[in-house]
Image (spheres, rainbow, N blue to C red):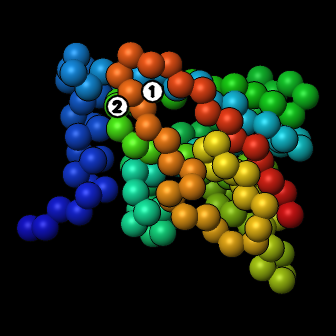
Amino acid sequence: MMINKATHIYFLLVLSLLLGSANTKAQNIEVTFSGIRSSAGQIRLEVFVDEEGFEKEKGIMIKYFKKIKLVKGEMNVKLDLPPGTYGLALLDDENNDDKMNYSFIGLPKEGFGFSNYYLSGLFKPKFEVFKFTVVKGQNQKILMKIRYM
């Protein structure tokens, strides 16, 4: 049986969270979502570990955040991740259907964003441009500016 890199990392992530090992202790990541246009719906945050998982839209973890602490279009959340390389992608799921909705010409109708990267073009970015590294013992702040088309 062949195990791909994303499956292997997912297994290690789950194992480390269950065992609470000192060597892979999860680090607290502070994530700021900015540019949120309304309090409707929820933020869907997906965690990726490589380009393959991102291309297939198969992250290792999905978290949902209600917009109850939304202040002037911003909110902060905490995320625990063990040391490693990650990329975050978010959907401002305004209608709570757990998927991106598109207009009749194919443009996203809901907001989206990536860790420490603002997509200014029209095409999905590569994992390489929004990835970041979690280092043991270092607190990390990630900014995710949401774009609406």
Residue 149 x %, y %: 86, 64
The residue shown at (69%, 25%) is 76
Q: Secondary structure at mark 2?
A: loop
Residue 135: x and y, percent?
39, 27
Res 83 label: 2
Q: Amino acid at mark 1?
A: Asp
Residue 56 higher or lower than 32, as above or below: below
Q: Quadrant of residue 120?
A: bottom right
Question: Within the image, what quadrant is residue 6 found in?
Answer: bottom left
Residue 25 visible somewhere in the drawing: yes
Q: Residue at x 45, y 69 (%)?
A: 56
In screen coordinates, is 87 left or right of 4?
Answer: right
Percent coordinates x, y for residue 23 in the rendering: 21, 21
| Marking on residue 19 | none
Q: On the rendered structure, is 100 left or right of 21?
A: right
Q: Nearer the viewer, residue 73 or 129?
A: 129
Q: Residue at x 76, y 67 (%)?
A: 121
Q: Between tags 1 and 2, which lies in front?
A: 2
Q: Is residue 42 left or right of residue 130?
A: right
Residue 80 image label:
1
Quadrant of image for the N terminus = bottom left
At which x and y percent is residue 52?
Answer: 39, 66
Does residue 47 appear in the picture of this structure? no
Secondary structure beneath disc 1?
strand
What's the amino acid at mark 2? Pro
- Give the image quarter of residue 111: bottom right
As drawn, the residue found furthest toward the left would be 1
Question: Along the line of sight, which residue is nearer the eye, 68 or 91?
Answer: 91
Q: CA distance from mark 1 to mark 2?
A: 10 Å
Q: Nearer the viewer, residue 23 or 133?
A: 133
